[in-house]
């Protein structure tokens, strides 16, 4: 009878733990990235043979569901992320700051809570205070996969880029007798627009002389004769560029090879030293870029150049491949990092921590960090948040079962107590 009472008491303890799991799940049913805890009951035997069975005990063990995804909902926050599939975000826990520098816990943490926002130091942190980690990117946007670190948005200025290439696509009128000109502004090394004028003067049959002037760059930068069709040596198709001749000043023309780019190089000094530029006029012997056909007037089809002015921070966004890009008000963007996804062989064995975070354990296996949608990792859902995987209806069902089982165990304790009382009263 004492054994029966002890068994019933362990049943009470086990059902109380199950009730605690249900309570935790219901309380966190609206917590982003929360993973519910189910209950597994395990029996322990005192003695069990073909002829004898003595009551043992039962314990309630948590059954984690870290690998089961919650519903993904859209968010107005552009930095919110959700993982569609397996994997976790790698995050770091800030431990303090001094002189504007934030220190982080050396341990590695993981989470599915992706409601990230920029904090005052430029780090992307979620509602639990964990900072998103990623691979830093070089100037070309290629990530360095050898080291993972907290992502910080600190490049708030986009340095100006001086104009180095100009593309011109136009038609000079065959038989033209008057000079024509087109203005074009370029950026200097400080991001300032500088005026330049491109003037074409007819100089005999199938020959035009190009003169580029820059009022703030030294005046005339030089001249060069552009030869078309029959004027070129060797001769090319009528109306197409065949070569350059008589270059002066800073001009230098590419050698005439059929099919090669027809490029002129020159330079201007806007006060910061010589700024080299190239003028792309199409290709030798091909009817693209600059041509000379019979039209009434000079027609410009395309005239553009590279280079950008100084840019200030506008916003930050995350792309579907995980690239974190800063956008600037000059229309440019810069990729500063890439968000990877970390997977485990047994994610349900991860150690749970405060704030919907996890740590690796021996049972979970090694952490494998890889690009989005590769090596078993899920895809990124941009501007989205993963909710809790708790099902309220299922939890209420578990609640009823736990309550009834708890009540049943109390009946065993009550009956055993009455039987023991009857046994004690036998000597009277």
Image (spheres, helix red, strand yellow):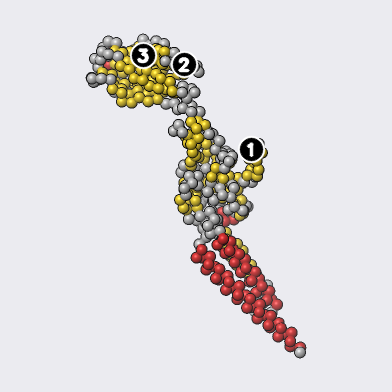
Give x and y (percent) for residue 325.
49, 38
Q: Earlier in the sequence, mark 1 or mark 3?
A: 1
- The residue carrying mark 3 is 211
Above-or-below relation of 174 to 383: above
Q: Earlier in the sequence, mark 3 or mark 2?
A: 3
- The residue carrying mark 2 is 269
Camera-side residue of 300 and 36 = 300
Q: Does residue 398 appear in the picture of this structure?
A: yes
The label number, if any, that marks residue 101 in the structure image: 1
Q: Which residue is drawn at the image coordinates 62% and 75% (left, top)?
A: 409
Q: Furthest residue to the bottom?
A: 428
Q: Which residue is drawn at the image coordinates 42% and 26% (left, top)?
A: 306
Q: Earlier in the sequence, mark 1 or mark 2?
A: 1
Quadrant of the image occupied by residue 249: top left
Question: Cα distance, mark 1 to mark 2?
Answer: 42 Å
Q: Does residue 232 appear in the picture of this structure?
A: no
312 to the left or right of 62: left
Above-or-below relation of 346 to 296: below
Task: Say which element carries label 2.
Answer: strand
Mark 3: few/some/many CA within 10 Å (<14, 14-19, 20+): many
Quadrant of the image occupied by residue 102: top right
The quadrant of the image that shows the N terminus is bottom right
The quadrant of the image that shows the C terminus is bottom right
Question: Cα distance, mark 1 to mark 3?
Answer: 55 Å
């Amino acid at each position: 009878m004492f054994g029966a009472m002890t068994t019933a008491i362990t049943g009470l303890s086990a059902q109380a733990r199950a009730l605690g799991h249900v309570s935790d799940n219901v309380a966190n049913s609206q917590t982003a990235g929360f993973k519910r805890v189910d209950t597994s009951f395990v029996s322990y035997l005192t003695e069990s043979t073909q002829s004898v069975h003595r009551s043992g005990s039962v314990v309630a063990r948590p059954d984690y569901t870290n690998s089961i995804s919650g519903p993904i909902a859209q968010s107005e926050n552009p930095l919110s992320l959700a993982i569609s599939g397996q994997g976790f975000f790698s995050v770091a826990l800030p431990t303090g700051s001094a002189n504007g520098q934030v220190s982080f816990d050396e341990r590695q943490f993981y989470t599915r809570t992706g409601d990230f926002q920029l904090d005052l130091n430029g780090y992307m942190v979620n509602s639990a205070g964990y900072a998103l980690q990623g691979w830093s990117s070089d100037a070309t946007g290629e990530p360095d996969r050898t080291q993972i670190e907290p992502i910080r948005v600190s490049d708030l200025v986009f340095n100006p880029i001086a104009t180095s290439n100009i593309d011109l696509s136009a038609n000079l009128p065959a038989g033209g007798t008057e000079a024509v000109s087109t203005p074009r502004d370029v950026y200097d090394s400080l991001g300032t627009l500088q005026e330049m004028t491109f003037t074409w003067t007819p100089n005999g049959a199938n020959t035009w002389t190009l003169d580029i002037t820059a009022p703030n760059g030294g005046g005339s930068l030089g001249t060069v004769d552009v030869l078309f069709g029959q004027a070129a040596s060797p001769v090319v198709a009528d109306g197409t560029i065949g070569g350059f001749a008589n270059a002066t000043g800073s001009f230098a023309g590419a050698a005439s090879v059929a099919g090669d780019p027809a490029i002129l190089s020159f330079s201007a000094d806007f006060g910061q030293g010589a700024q080299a530029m190239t003028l792309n006029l199409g290709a030798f012997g091909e009817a693209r870029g600059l041509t000379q056909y019979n039209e009434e007037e000079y027609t410009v089809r395309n005239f553009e150049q590279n280079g950008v002015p100084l840019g200030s921070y506008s916003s930050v966004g995350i792309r579907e491949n995980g690239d974190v890009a800063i956008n600037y008000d000059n229309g440019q963007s810069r990729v500063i990092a890439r968000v990877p996804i970390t997977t485990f062989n047994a994610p349900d064995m991860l150690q749970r921590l405060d704030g919907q975070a996890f740590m690796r354990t021996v049972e979970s296996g090694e952490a494998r960090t890889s690009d989005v949608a590769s090596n078993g990792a899920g895809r990124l859902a941009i501007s989205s948040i993963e909710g809790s995987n708790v099902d309220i209806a299922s939890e209420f069902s578990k609640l009823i079962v736990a309550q009834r089982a708890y009540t049943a165990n109390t009946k065993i304790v009550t009956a055993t107590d009455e039987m023991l009382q009857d046994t004690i009263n036998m000597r009277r």
